[in-house]
């Protein structure tokens, strides 16, 4: 069986963070593992408090995984402070996983900050260069590049600027744009575009976490990057289409809709070992 590790914050309400990542890995038939960097007391409506895990415990969790069950892919999510970023970056350099999907989480779906704004420089210098694929949404891409993004051409320009920071590929997600939900991927040579219908629902808690962890799962299963993104775009769109009206705020997506309806897809069964 293929394996994937999520290095991220936890979401006690279950819709985002490590909890969303593990659900997504399971929905793809991938064995999921976790290293928690922050404990976040949040729900669908608000973030109440954040407690960062001490750096030595973060490092110990990553060591515990890689010295026993190496990961075929790693997804990195919320890293709230420079010390968290530096600790995770050091361990990724040590273990050299083949695929590293980094979701530069800055805000919860309800707008509450999850990253110290002063951490942007450390993110750019220390974390971004380690990404096989970086998956910023438009507000995150604006923070990283310092530019305003309103058009598809702006998304292409932002992807180019972020790629120059050292990552192998960057996927600028169009969920915050108007019109169709188009994502732009740039690998340093060519642009690829991933379109989906825009689903009008407030229940989108954890979509970024789900999308990035789906890409990690697909890469762990052996798909190439373009196919992994296409599969993941379809998966997260289905999860949003059948999202769950739970809680008083932005409800979660349905990570297991296809699994409940159809069982584990045949393509994944054949790929998984």
Image (tube, rainbow, N blue to C red):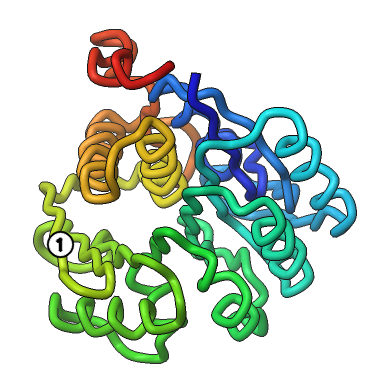
* Residue at image point 73% right, 74% down: 82
Indicate the position of residue 220 as horizontal and vertical percent values: 43, 35
Number of numbered markers: 1
Indicate the position of residue 57 as horizontal and vertical percent values: 87, 49
Is residue 152 shown above or below 172? below
According to the picture, the residue beneath numbered tag 1 turns out to be 192
Please identify the quadrant where the C terminus is shown.
top left
Indicate the position of residue 46 as horizontal and vertical percent values: 59, 53
Q: Residues within 10 Å of mark 1 (few under 14, many from 20)?
A: few
Q: Is residue 244 left or right of residue 258?
A: right
Q: Is residue 205 visible?
A: no
The front one of 47 and 173 is 173
* Residue at image point 80% right, 57% down: 52
* Residue at image point 64% right, 48% down: 7
* Residue at image point 24% right, 9% down: 262
Is residue 224 shown above or below 50? above
**Residue 153: quarter of image:** bottom left
Indicate the position of residue 136 as horizontal and vertical percent values: 40, 66
Is residue 184 shown above or below 211? below
Q: Is residue 123 left or right of residue 195?
A: right
Q: Is residue 190 visible?
A: yes
């Amino acid at each position: 069986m293929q394996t994937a590790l999520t290095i991220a914050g936890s979401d006690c309400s279950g819709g985002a963070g490590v909890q969303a990542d593990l659900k997504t890995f399971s929905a793809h038939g991938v064995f999921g593992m976790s290293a928690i960097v922050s404990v976040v007391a949040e729900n669908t409506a608000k973030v109440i408090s954040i407690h960062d895990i001490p750096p030595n415990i973060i490092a110990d969790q990553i060591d515990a995984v890689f010295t026993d069950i190496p990961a075929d892919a790693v997804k990195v999510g919320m890293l709230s402070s420079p010390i968290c970023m530096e600790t995770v970056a050091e361990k990724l350099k040590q273990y050299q996983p083949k695929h590293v999907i980094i979701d530069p989480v800055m805000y919860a779906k309800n707008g509450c900050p999850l990253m110290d704004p002063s951490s942007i420089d450390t993110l750019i210098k220390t974390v971004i260069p380690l990404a096989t694929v970086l998956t910023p949404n438009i507000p995150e891409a604006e923070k990283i590049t310092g530019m305003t993004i309103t058009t598809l051409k702006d998304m292409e320009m932002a992807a180019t600027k972020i790629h120059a920071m050292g990552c192998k590929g960057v996927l600028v997600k169009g969920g915050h744009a108007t019109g169709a939900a188009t994502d732009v991927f740039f690998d340093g040579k060519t642009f690829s575009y991933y379109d989906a219908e825009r689903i009008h629902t407030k229940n989108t808690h954890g979509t970024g976490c789900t999308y990035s962890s789906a890409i990690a799962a697909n890469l762990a299963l052996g798909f190439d990057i373009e196919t992994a993104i296409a599969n993941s775009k379809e998966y997260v769109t289905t999860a949003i289409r059948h999202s769950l009206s739970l809680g008083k705020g932005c409800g979660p997506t349905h990570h297991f809709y296809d699994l409940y309806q159809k069982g584990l897809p045949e393509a994944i069964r054949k790929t998984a070992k």
